[in-house]
Image: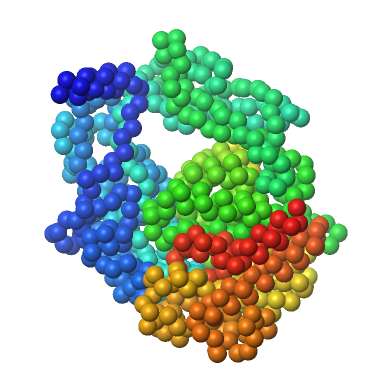
Amino acid sequence: MRNSALFFFSFWICFANAQTISINLESDWEFKGADTLSWMPAAVPGTVHTDLMANNVIEDPFKDNNEIEQQWIEKHNWEYRTKFEIKKGLLKEFHQELHFKGLDTYADVYLNGTLILEANNMFRSWTVNVDTLVKKGPNELRIVFTSPIVKNLENARSHLRLPGGSDTSEYPVAPFTRKAAYHFGWDWAPRFVTSGIWKNIQLVHWKKLKFEDIGYTYRLDNNTAKIGGLLKINSAAQQKVKVYLNDSIYSIELKQGVNEVGLQYQMNVERWWPNGSGDQKLYTFDFGFIENGKKSDPVDSQKIGFRTIELINEPDSIGTSFYFLVNNQPTFMKGANYVPQDVFLPRVKPEQYHWLLTQVKEAGMNMLRVWGGGVYEQELFYDLCDEYGILVWQDFMFANTLYPSDSLFMSNVYLEVIEQIQRISKHTCLALWCGNNEIEVAWKNWGWQNQYGYSPEDSLQFWNDYSSFFEINLSTVAYLFNRNKTPYVSTSPQSNWGTAENFNHGSMHYWGVWHGPDDFNGFHQNVGRFMAEWGFQSFPDYELLSQYVSADQLSLESEVMKNRQKSYIGNGKISAVMSIYSLYGGDASSLTFKDYITNSQWVQSLGYQEAIKTHLSKQPHCMGTLLWQLNDCWPGPSWSIINYDGKPKESYHAVKSAFTSEE
């Protein structure tokens, strides 16, 4: 008891002297259906699906055809609650805030019975001051999640039908919902429309001042970096403080409220280079306060690399170029498209990020495209890309559909993109902002106007809304809030693969080998200026499938495996190409299921190696190749080179050989 009392006394002295204290509210949560009475334990961060599975209410969603059986979950509302206490001293002397890092998606938040937040965007964070609502002793935090289907069904019914990506419902709600599009299903992903607290919630106590953020800009003059730090700090009153940035000390005057203060710093640096082009030199910048003449522990620490990057996307002698200059050097981009690593995002562990990004580096890749139907990734992803020299082509989260243009929807979107621009642009790896995935090429080439019965007036309005947002407004926002002026393009691809002339213009998504009639010769004959998407399907490993598919369903024609094939092309394309490039010879239908899987992976590896070798050989006409896709979000047929469990397929080794032998 004496030791415990001494520990508490020391702990309390530390609390009393601290300016900011943050506590994760991740324990003692419970949840239930909004229309039921029984509360069950919940994990935070988490999702309703994984919580239901942990409580044995449902089986593993990935098992057999449970995806179909569990569609009822997306139509229900769910409640989560916990209790927390605040010490009397903290309640009296400190301001109190709740920070919600990520709520998926429509969430009414109540503190001690009072509504404090109506969240409506999976991609945003939220901060709420609760000084007047918290109390000594237990405080109850309750969050009511409304189903996106329930929330937006009337919007979808009353609005002109929008394409909806892969949301093939009678009234698609995906375009109205600021939520990961792949949760509504894709041609490589199941449909699980999740709800839940998908990122941490923090209880933050702060006293005289609270550090909010610091971002850095820099200008390189040979080996000298002239650095500007933009400090954002909240002050309870007008006051003077001293802060430090590494070995420099600054005196600043703060007004009451939120302050933005510029700091200047200069140093000699070595340049950061992409993987395969040089070293990834990162410099640590520690920021903190001077208290009683001594440096406090840093309140922020960032690792920054110094490099220049330009996108050269302009008319030239044969069409329109698309290539990157890194440190003034034309650099061929070798990489892949990245999708979220799980349908249920909180399940992805830090070690999985480390493993996957290590595989990327070892494969000789220097770029990943974070695709626009997933999520803006967590800090660890970008930190590892900084460390490993993996440039990031970052899509904004808009994909394969049109979107509403009303003021409430758009104001929500602008707050989302500003937050993400300011967060991600801190990272050295960031190479490009891209407005959306395939919306413009779809509008011009996929026949949406006829398919959805749009009148000429409707079509004109849709195009004007699209152009205003992606070509003007989002471009402007990306420029204004982008700390180091990363290049921006409005869409990918910039050119359709339908004609030979198109392969001379900008970025290209070439799908003639999968969605079109071409065999692998198409990879040799159709090479664009920058191949931002292309690929060929294979099946996941037999051993992995066996963990999720019952033995009597492990066949190509079983109902379970038919449902797992999400591409409308089905398995016919794989079988047809097998007949040309077969590892075994003969008709694919004569193969056992296990041999079919092995053959699909071998054929995929052959196509990927041939495509990459061709793209590399066509420099400088072609200056980048990003295969579709790097990884999987569940165990099913896809274009990936790495299985859902992280094990590389045969195609990974072929890609690695093609990329590294070129160095």
For residue 106, say whether it is visible: no
Q: Which residue is drawn at 34% across and 68% down?
A: 61
Q: Residue lying furthest top in this view?
A: 293
Q: Residue lying furthest right in this view?
A: 317
Residue 11, position as x, y percentages in the image: 27, 23
Between 610 and 126, the one nearer to me in the picture: 610
Between 438 and 266, the one nearer to me in the picture: 266
**Residue 492: quadrant of the picture:** bottom right
State which quarter of the image contains the N terminus.
top left
Q: In this view, does 636 lie above or below 574?
A: above
Q: Is residue 122 above or below residue 11?
A: below
Residue 497, position as x, y percentages in the image: 69, 71
Residue 310, position as x, y percentages in the image: 72, 45
**Residue 125: quadrant of the picture:** top left
Residue 114, position as x, y percentages in the image: 20, 43
For residue 149, say whether it is visible: yes
Q: Residue at x 38, y 55 (%)?
A: 347
**Residue 178: quadrant of the picture:** bottom left
Residue 495 placement, left or right of 158 = right
Q: Residue at x 44, y 75 (%)?
A: 564
